[in-house]
């Protein structure tokens, strides 16, 4: 990685983080309120009626909500910002007039998505630990899963934002594709409780592996496949990253 490339990545990252910090008060309020609502409504309300054996439902739920937060803050933020940069403020066109490569632009957006996801995850973990005393286990290992899944959904956000021409379609895709993942990937209920015919499909989604890995870490479960989960997510991320660069080139360069 040469000096020019580093400067390019930092410039794109800094611009996206500048926009993020300008709306920090709104972002902080959303980050604090939204996941806490899920915890209090499902974890502390419905959770009293759910029998998870030796584990309380709120302890089962917290790692899943953590990755819902990571998904929302990596996918939604990057997809919306990229669509705005392309169609409204034209900053994407300005970036392309500079001697930068599509790979560098896409990677810059993804790094911003990862940073924002890490910030959101940190706020959630601190709130859960301080108010409810929930432990998330080995934080360094958990951070690896957060970075991997944030990179995946940031790449997915780039691919979808560049693929779609109408911004209204972005919300349709989000509602029909991304949002259902939150309900089917083991966040609220174990995947094994779903109908058997859909379980193989759910198990190939990277978010499912991330939630399984996070829950294993948080609950101290001995799972020999935890590193395989992480490797699988990284492989999926590389694939979707390559797809996002291809779509970016087709839509902007050609």
Image (cartoon, rainbow, N blue to C red):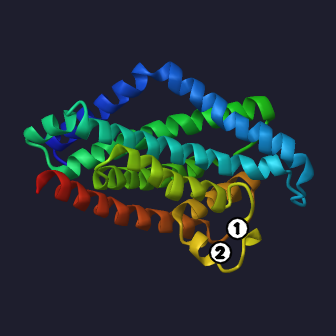
Residue 137: in sight, yes or no?
no
Which of 188 and 167 lies nearest the eye of the viewer?
167
Looking at the picture, does residue 35 appear above or below residue 52?
above
Classify residue 203 by image quadrant: bottom right
Q: Earlier in the sequence, mark 2 or mark 1?
A: 1
Give left or right: position of 200 versus 131.
left
Residue at 80% from the left image edge and 46% from the top image edge: 58
Q: Is residue 201 above or below residue 242?
A: below
The residue beneath circle 2 is 199
Q: CA distance from mark 2 to mark 1?
A: 7 Å
Near mark 2 (Cα within 10 A), the count class, few <14, some 14-19 or many ≥20, is some
Is residue 177 in view from this perspective? yes
The label number, if any, that marks residue 191 in the structure image: 1
**Which residue is the extreme one toward the bottom?**
197
Task: Specify few, some or many for label 1: CA neighbours under 10 Å numbering under 14, 14-19, or 20 or more.
Answer: many
| Residue 16, position as x, y percentages in the image | 33, 32
């Amino acid at each position: 990685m040469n000096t020019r490339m580093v400067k390019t990545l930092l410039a794109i990252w800094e611009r996206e983080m500048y926009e993020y910090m300008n709306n920090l008060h709104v972002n902080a309020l959303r980050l604090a309120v939204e996941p806490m609502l899920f915890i209090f409504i499902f974890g502390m309300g419905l959770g009293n009626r759910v029998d998870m054996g030796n584990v309380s439902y709120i302890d089962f739920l917290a790692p899943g909500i953590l990755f819902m937060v990571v998904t929302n803050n990596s996918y939604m933020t990057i997809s919306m910002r990229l669509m705005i940069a392309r169609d409204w403020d034209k900053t994407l066109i300005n970036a392309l007039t500079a001697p930068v490569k599509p790979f560098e632009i896409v990677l810059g957006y993804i790094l911003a998505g990862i940073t924002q996801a890490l910030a959101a995850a940190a706020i959630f973990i601190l709130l859960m630990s301080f108010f409810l005393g929930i432990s998330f286990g080995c934080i360094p290992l958990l951070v690896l899963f957060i970075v991997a899944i944030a990179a995946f959904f940031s790449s997915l956000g780039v691919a979808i934002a560049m693929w779609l021409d109408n911004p209204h379609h972005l919300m349709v895709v989000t509602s029909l594709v991304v949002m259902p993942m939150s309900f089917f990937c083991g966040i609220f209920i174990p995947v094994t409780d779903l109908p058997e015919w859909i379980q193989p499909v759910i198990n190939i989604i990277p978010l499912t592996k991330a939630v399984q890995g996070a829950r294993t870490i948080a609950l101290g479960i001995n799972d020999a496949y935890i590193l395989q989960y992480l490797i699988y997510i990284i492989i999926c991320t590389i694939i979707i990253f390559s797809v996002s660069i291809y779509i970016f080139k087709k839509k902007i360069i050609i």
